[in-house]
Structure formats: structure tokens, C-alpha cells
Amino acid sequence: MTTLRAITGTRDILPEEVSAWHRIEAVARTLFARYGYREIRTPVFETTELFARGIGADTDIVAKEMYTFDDRDGASVTLRPEATAGIVRAVIEHNLMNTDPALKVYALGSMFRRERPQKGRYRQFHQVDVEAFGLSRPSIDVEVIEVALAYLEACGLTRFELVLNSVGDAKCRPAYVETLRTELRRSASKLCADCQRRIETNPLRVLDCKVPGDQAIIDALPRISDHLCGECRDHFAEVRRELNLLGIPYRLSHRLVRGLDYYTRTTFEVVSGELGSQNSVLGGGRYDGLVKDLGGPDLTGIGFALGMERLVMLLPEQVIAGRCDVFLAPLVPAALDKALLLQRALRRAGFAVLMDPEGRSFKSQMKRADKLGARFVLILGEDEMAKGVWTLRDMAGSSQAEVKDDAVTGHLMEKLNG
Ligand code: ATP
Ligand code: MG
């Protein structure tokens, strides 16, 4: 029989790793609340149409990465490849902006993309997602960026880089895209096949190309920063002024673009040199046209999505938290009942208590207690049974003492809480 294995591109988060996940989840909840964000949970699958409209047909995600299938009734459904489209759908469906015109939400959860699996790139992965609706001033762009960076710092990261750009808006971008297209057509034959296609479908995405041979040509292309309209230029200048005011360093990159029409103005990304080739930790930007495009009111939006697997990879080594306050070692079969009762009482008193139920030798039980990082071991052998005591061993000080049966809980409370 062949061994059953996890599907390519999916991975198990094993108990050893899960404490890191608990940490970044807890930090997200506390930190985002401080900025006024509340959690939203949306389904992991939605109609295919939502993503086709909400992400755009000429993107890698929609063109080749979606897990799409026909449901039993023939409806086409898709496992969510990102969170924003589903959140926007929920905002519209429940009229959330009526009760809160400045709506701030965050979400944590699994995303699904059929990519080529490699380090930091999976087919099921997890994102932290932050979105703010109905706010259009530059200050909110800066706040969203600040939340992202504060989150990374609160998780213990120190080395990362913020990359920043503005992609203009519906007024100034079309003219720039045409300029770009004209320029690109001149050097089309020297570009990779993907870029040649993009010249016609979506020239902005050429700026995103990673093919080494294309880089010199792309770097010399006209820059969007020289083609912004007055309003976009002012918005971007104010974003940078406020970032400077708050002492947030950034690097400008004219090549940081989002190829979709509803993306406007500020785009940003945080990269880390420690991630290798998948160096992007999070990406975000303003998407003022999306809510309307998905059938809602004309509501601005800005947000970011962060890859949790990549964040976990970057976390500084953590001391694994002790999992055991007290280890119980009943050494003879007759000691079992007393051990079971004490185990229950101690757990109810709030302690993490473990016991080796297999009746192994004293030596192997002590080894196990040591491995579990137990702070105290309570030993119950024939001697102790006869005297009505437990032997309490302090693993740190390696001292031991006898404690009367009825005093054990109180004694431990004092030692462990004190
Ligand atoms: P990339 O350029 O790495 O493919 P992307 O532009 O597709 O990233 P976004 O859609 O902006 O990424 O997603 C935001 C974040 O989610 C990324 O910065 C990354 O940390 C994470 N991410 C994206 N795709 C994957 C994946 N397949 N596996 C793990 N993490 C991912
Ligand atoms: Mg991608």
C-alpha cells in the first residue's frame, strides 16, 4: 500500500511550530485593536465571479493560480486566493459602511493558490489581512503602513525594508500606460515572451518582471512619478511627509505597481533580505475603485496582506515555553488512584500537570520529567504511601522534601505562584 501524504504545496504546522503561530496571532489581535481594527471572518470559498471581477483576469492569480471547481449544482466556486475580495463582498452585502463610515477590519486565515511550491511559497498558506474603508486622506495610508510595520516589530522583527510608490489614479494613469506601451513596443523584441504579451494586455505589469535579461530595458522606462496628476502628486508628497514626520524610513521604487485599474495612488511592500528569493513579507496599497467595481457604493479602500509562513520563518528563535509545572511519578500500582486525584485537583487549580501513565521505572520517569521541562516532580512510592506524604523534587534546585498529602496543593500554589 502506498503511504498517504499531504498534498503537494500544503504543509502541517506541527506542535513544535505552533507556539510561534499562536504568538503572531495574539500580537495581531492586540495590536490591530489598538488602531481600531476589528476582526472579520469570511468563507474560504466564494463564487468564482467574485475573484474574476475583484482581482482581474490578466493577473497570475486569476489566469493560472486559482482552485476553481464546479459544485454539484454546476455553480463555479473558488477557494479564496486572497482576502480582500471576500471582505469587500461582505462589506457590501451587510452594508457595513452604513453603521461605520470609517470601517477598519482585519482577518487571519488560509489562502489557496496553485503555485510552484518552494521555500516560502505554498498552495495553501496563511495571511494576515488589514483593510480600511471610507478613508481617503494620506494620513490613513500612513497609518496602514505604520500598523504593518508595528506588527512586524511587535513580532520581534528588526530587519526589513519598506518600499513605496504611487501608481496614480484614473485621471493620470491611462496616459502614462500609453506612454509606457509606446516605449515598450520599441524594444518588444528584446523582452521575454510574458512581457511581449503584457505590452498589449497590461503594460504596467512589465515593471514587475523578474527575468534578468529584461531588467536594463525596464529600468530605463518612463517613470510613473514623472506622470502623476497634481492631486496624486500632492497625495503622495503628503504620505511621504507624514512618514518622515513619524520617522518611518522607506525606499522609493517606481517599479512597485499593481496592474489593476482599481488600484490607486499609494502602493507599498515590505521585503526582507533573510527570505531568499521569496523576499516579500507583505504587500498593500490603496484600491479606491474596488468597492464600486464589485457593485457597492463609491467607497475608498486601502489595506495590506502579509504572509504568515514568511513571518514565522523570520521570527527570532524563541525559547519554547515550559509545558509542565508538575510531573507526577507514581512508582507503584497502588499509587495510581492518589496520583489521579491529585492530578485532577492540581489541573483544576490551574497548573499544567503531566503524568506517565505507563508505569515505567523511576529513572525513565525522571528523564521524561526533565525532557518536558517540569519545574516540580511529585514522587509517590511505597515509602511515601506508608507515611502519607509525597516527595517533592524541585528540578531547578535539584533539592527535595517530603510534603504531607493534604498540604501538597497549597505548597505548590505557593511555590508556583509566588
Ligand atoms: P509574490 O510576489 O511573492 O508572489 P504576491 O504579489 O503574489 O507575492 P500578494 O498577493 O500581495 O503576494 O500576497 C501578500 C503576501 O502573501 C506576500 O507578500 C507573501 O508574504 C504572501 N504570499 C503570497 N503568495 C504566497 C504563497 N503562495 N505562499 C506563501 N505566502 C504567500
Ligand atoms: Mg504571487
Image (cartoon, rainbow, N blue to C red):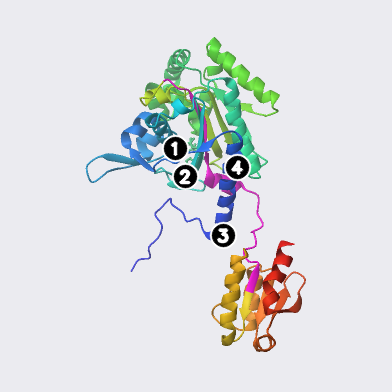
Task: Quote the CA–CA distance across marks 4 and 3.
Answer: 23 Å
First of labels 3, 1 by sequence position: 3
Q: State the SS at label 4.
A: helix
- Residue 211, position in %: x, y? 48, 33
First of labels 2, 4 by sequence position: 4
- Disc 3: which residue: 16
Label 2: few (<14), some (14–19) or many (≥20) C-alpha neighbours in 10 Å = some
Task: Quote the CA–CA distance across marks 2 and 3.
Answer: 20 Å
**311 drawn magenta:** yes
- CB at mark 4 closer than 8 A to ligand 1? no
Q: Can I make out residue 56 in this image?
A: no
Inspect the image, locate mark 3, and give the three-letter code of the amino acid beneath it: Glu
Q: Which mark is residue 109?
A: 2
- Disc 4: which residue: 30
Inspect the image, locate mark 4, and give the three-letter code of the amino acid beneath it: Thr
Q: Report the front residue among 78 and 137.
A: 137
- Disc 1: which residue: 83
Q: Report the front residue among 313 and 202.
A: 313
Quarter of image, res 174: top left
> Which segment is the magenta one?
298-327
